[in-house]
Image (spheres, rainbow, N blue to C red):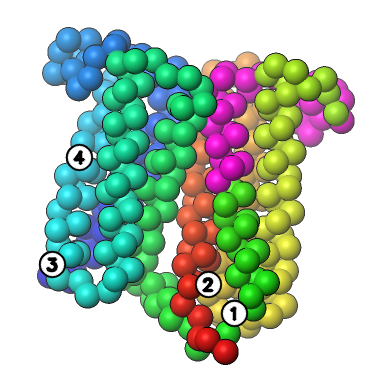
Amino acid sequence: MQKLIQRLANLSAIGMFLILAMGALVTKADAGRGCGDEWPLCNGKFVPAHTISSFIEYSHRLVVGIVTLILIATFFLVFRYVKRKDAKFFISGTVLMTLIQAAMGALAVVWPQSSLVLALHFGLSLLAFAFALLLALVFTSWGQFQRDTVIRSSFKAFVWITAVYSYVVVYLGAFVRHTVSTGGCSGWPLCNGKVVPELSGATGIVFTHRVAALLLFICILFLYLQAKRYYHGSDKLRLGSKWALILVSLQVISGAVVTWSMGNEVAYLFTGMLHAIIVSCMFGFLCYLCVLTLYDRKA
């Protein structure tokens, strides 16, 4: 039974990852209205006509439905056969965030939402993925959260501050996509040929996201340096911080590539999806570090 639960937990994490990637594709391909104003039907049909936008949107809905069924099965088995309270918390969080973001997605189709609300849709999907990832890790060596060393209070606080701030940066990135503001800054690292451009309209939105992303890189770099200073090389805090730093570095690079690829529709679509995928993995590692800080040995 434990192996079955582990497989379902892994499928849940993979499924939530697919939902994130496909959601980014829907936004980048401007396929959110591919099924018109109907839900759960698509343009009045259970199986829609094979237009590109309807196929992308309907595929996303189908994957959400399948993953939801997997989550329900996982939820039942975890509460029935797993004794760890953290596993029950993680699956509950995954199911709750998935249901909320699915409901928001349906409402966004039936009643058009503002860019602020649409950006939150990606943020909820990101939280669902983080919970699913943590659940999957419970059944691996990385899921042995209990520590035999004390974590410095200042390090704990900075881990949580960085994780919360990273969520804000992700939200800003989603807001850039949903307001179609990416073209507000041409060129990278300069914005429209200036270090500080005129902060209005799409330019102001994109530039704010760039500055926020730079500050996030600095925060995670400092986090890794602190982990490297105070914890040995095989410590999960140090390894998690290292991977967070690698991913935020890739995130910065992918953001630059997104800007450079504007004008090439295929490249822009691919790099935009890659950008969303990398940030999802980075946020997952930061959430993992947050969980580790809750299980340290008390001084």
Sooner in the amino-acid sequence: mark 3 or mark 4: 4
CB within 8 Å, label 2 to label 1 = yes
The residue at which mark 1 appears reads as 151
Q: Residue at x 50, y 86 (%)?
A: 297
The residue positioned 46% from the left and 34% from the top of the image is: 120
Tell me the residue at 31%/42% (across/down).
98
Let me know if residue 17 appears in the view.
Answer: yes
Say which residue label 2 marks. Answer: 293
Task: Name the quarter where the N terminus is drawn.
Answer: bottom left
Dot 2 or dot 1: first in sequence order is: 1
How far apart are labels 2 and 1 at the CA level? 7 Å
From the top left corner, tell me how far across and down residue 240 is, in percent. Answer: 55, 66
Residue 122 lies, in percent from the top left, at 45, 35
What is the spatial separation of the Cα atoms under label 3 and label 4, in whole angstroms?
22 Å
| Front in this rendered view, residue 138 or 256 | 138
- Neighbor class of circle 2 (other Cα within 10 Å; few <14, some 14-19, many 20+) is many
The amino acid beneath tag 3 is: Arg
* Label 2 vs 3, first from the N-terminus: 3
Within the image, what quadrant is residue 265 found in? top right
The disc labelled 1 sits on which kind of residue? Answer: Ile
Is label 4 or label 1 in front? 1
Q: Is residue 201 magenta?
A: no
Q: For the residue labelled by badge 1, is the local secondary structure a helix, a strand or a loop?
A: loop
Q: Is residue 43 positioned above or below 182 on the image?
A: above
Q: Position of residue 254 (x, y in %)?
A: 62, 39
Q: Which residue is mark 4?
A: 66
Query: Which x, y percent locates residue 263?
Result: 63, 16
Cβ–Cβ under 8 Å for marks 4 and 1: no
